[in-house]
Image (tube, rainbow, N blue to C red):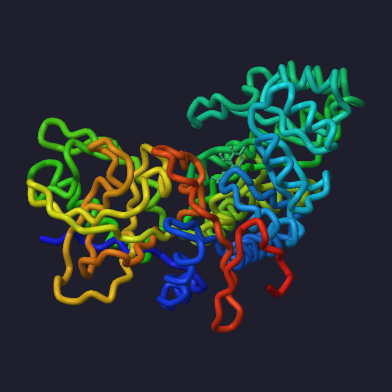
Amino acid sequence: MTPPAVPAALAPPVAAFLADRAAVRDALRRFGSPVHLVFPQVFETNLAALRGVLDGAGLRYRICYAHKVNRSAAFAATAAHAGIGIDVASGPELRSARAAGFPADRIEVTGPKGRAMLVAAVDAGVTVNVDNLWELETLAALGPAPVLVRVSGFAGSAPSRFGVDLADIDTALEMLVRHRDRVPLRGFAFHLDTASTAERVRAVADCLELIERAYARGLTPTVLDIGGGLRQVFTADPAGYDAYDAALRAGLLGHGPALHWGTSTFGYHVADGAVHGSAVFHKYANTDPAPALLAELLAAPLPGHGGRALGKVLADNLLELWLEPGKALVDRAGITVARVEFVKRTGGGATLVHLDLSRDTVTAADQEVLIDPIVLTAATGSGPAGVYFAGRLCLERDLVTQRQVRVPQLPEPGDPVVFANTAAYHTDLSAAGASMHPTPAKVAVVRRGTEFVLCPDADHRPGERP
Ligand SMILES: Cc1ncc(COP(=O)(O)O)c(C=O)c1O
């Protein structure tokens, strides 16, 4: 039995590029294999969709692109050109944002920061999204610096290592009052890595209460920053995804052909004749596009506000909503292409398609890629098959996919294989230079009519015709 297919959802410019086999082969010839291709035009489309939702809600808002999602200079330049803000989480990201053209007043620094980062933020004159009381105290000495206070500890949310716990907010407010000239309070922030609208609504309600408490002490916050966490859509066929998941579980139980390699269980726990827990690839299951999730949040009734929609409450209170989307802005805006080295059979009867790529080039260590890599081959004859993708690195578990993937046709050496939707964290979170392999080139792809113009990522200039 060949496993069920889990086809990738592709943005139209990416689908058009992949349909142009000569363009794909040309990219590999010019920039080597593997190569990361980023599509700034898809970023622009994703941004326009989020803006559409926010404009429709009649609010004041700011979108801050979360730079950490990808090191791409082309995405950062695209965000700067579009006039949005940027969220940076390190000194190099701050420098990248400046190089992309962001003025200080459109940059916020997030995440836990050491003293050097705080000094750099104050020197640059950017907004500091404060993670803890030590940061606030240090900034009060180093400032002036406008601040947001990141809050955590909301009822119903998982405990967090980030932010000032709600229980410590009074201490933070006292410090903000005492040092109001050094650390003027712009507002409150949170970031929840969840798809749950209910959880975000609770956090917003708590933050609105904090804003009232801040006003009662003479402070004048105007910003509510809800962070990132809007989901991506990976698969073009949710039913195929579910069928695959079911077949994978059946295989783990021995009730069907094994689709897993060796002892891999993908986070599932097999005991007492059942599969328990949730798999590490749960984010691949999402079917709600980010704009729909954002619209749902803005329309959600806010407890304690007479059932008024969250967006309306913010607008009525003249608050500015800030968002820090990472994944949502680069959703389907990047792919990684590698070449097939060879195809082989193992002693156990498995088929391995060996690529000139390592697992950590396309996914974070613990995450299994749960959409099928796309094989671009002219070969005919084998018909559909279930294969494991293997690649560089030496350990038995270093397969690129530890699950069997359905391919319509076995490829041949030199054929391109495409990993779709890799721009969000997949390519840049853990891309290591093991075995002295160089880091893959990153290349911006721009569609002009029926042509594709490719240039090194760092050379992409939004608005200029190459
Ligand atoms: C503070 C903060 N904001 C925004 C983001 C971006 O999140 P996402 O890519 O889920 O939108 C992150 C991600 O870790 C984050 O830590």
Q: Residue 276's spot in the image, x, y percent?
A: 23, 36
Q: Nearer the viewer, residue 317 or 413?
A: 413
Q: Residue 132's spot in the image, x, y percent?
A: 68, 22
Q: Nearer the viewer, residue 45 or 445?
A: 445
Q: Residue 44's spot in the image, x, y percent?
A: 63, 65
Q: Name the quadrant of the N terminus.
A: bottom left
Q: Quadrant of ligand 1?
A: top right
Q: Is residue 452 left or right of residue 86?
A: left
Place residue 116 in its image quadrant. Answer: top right
Place residue 153 in its image quadrant. Answer: top right
Identified at 43% across, 77% down, the residue is: 22
* 43 lies above or below 126: below
* 392 lies above or below 132: below
Name, please, the residue furthest toward the right.
Answer: 181
* 255 lies above or below 375: above
Q: Residue 339's spot in the image, x, y percent?
A: 35, 61
Place residue 229 in its image quadrant. Answer: top right
* 347 lies above or below 140: below
Could you tell me how many numbered marks the image carries? 0
Q: Is residue 233 left or right of residue 353?
A: right
Q: Nearer the viewer, residue 449 or 188?
A: 449
Identified at 67% across, 62% down, the residue is: 460
Identified at 58% across, 56% down, the residue is: 329
Q: Name the quadrant of the C terminus.
A: bottom right
Q: Is residue 294 left or right of residue 29?
A: right
Q: Is residue 352 left or right of residue 7?
A: left
